Amino acid sequence: MKFTTVFLALGAFLASITLTEAAAIDHAGPWSQIHHKDSIEHFQIYAAAKESDLRTAKPVMSKCSVKFPKNKAYTYHQFAEGGLLEFQRLGAHTMGINCPECTPQQVGNLYLTKWSNYFECKVQDHRA
């Protein structure tokens, strides 16, 4: 009985921590603000205003994933180095990448010239 009570209390505590962390980031921000980076499997790329809530914006590119999963750490290092991009967790395994200084066409050009080395996107908006 005591074990069950302690187990339920611990579960409730852990759930509240997870919900608080998820609710804390309601807009795009720096890479250092993102936690649990290893669970990221998919990306969506945006050209929204600075510090926008990417959950309500339309992505320029979606269904993106890291090209070489073994090089995931190197890809994340590239994210952390540049000051151009903002990031927001969109789901348990999905990350939003925002280029606030870019138009959709510039995002498309960046993808073709730089980002396609690191990840590939299955869907492109007609604006890119």
Image (spheres, helix red, strand yellow):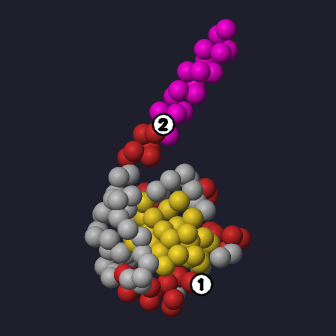
Say which amino acid is labelled 1. Asn
Quarter of the image with the C terminus in it: bottom left
Of helix, strand and loop, which one carries label 2? helix
Q: Main secondary structure of the magenta part?
A: helix
- Please tell me the numbered disc located at residue 4: none
Label 2, on which residue? Answer: 17
Residue 29 shows up from this direction:
no
Q: Which sits in the foreground, 120 or 17?
A: 120
Q: Quadrant of the N terminus?
A: top right
Would residue 46 be found to the left or right of residue 122 on screen?
Answer: left
Q: Residue at x 55, y 69 (%)?
A: 63
Callout 2 amino acid: Ile
Task: Find the magenta span and give its range.
Answer: 1-18
Q: Give the residue at mark 1.
A: 117
Q: Name which quarter of the figure residue 122 lies in.
A: bottom right
The stretch drawn in magenta includes residue 25: no
Residue lying farthest to the front in this orientation? 126
Q: Residue at x 53, y 59 (%)?
A: 94
Q: Position of residue 120 (x, y in %)?
A: 59, 78
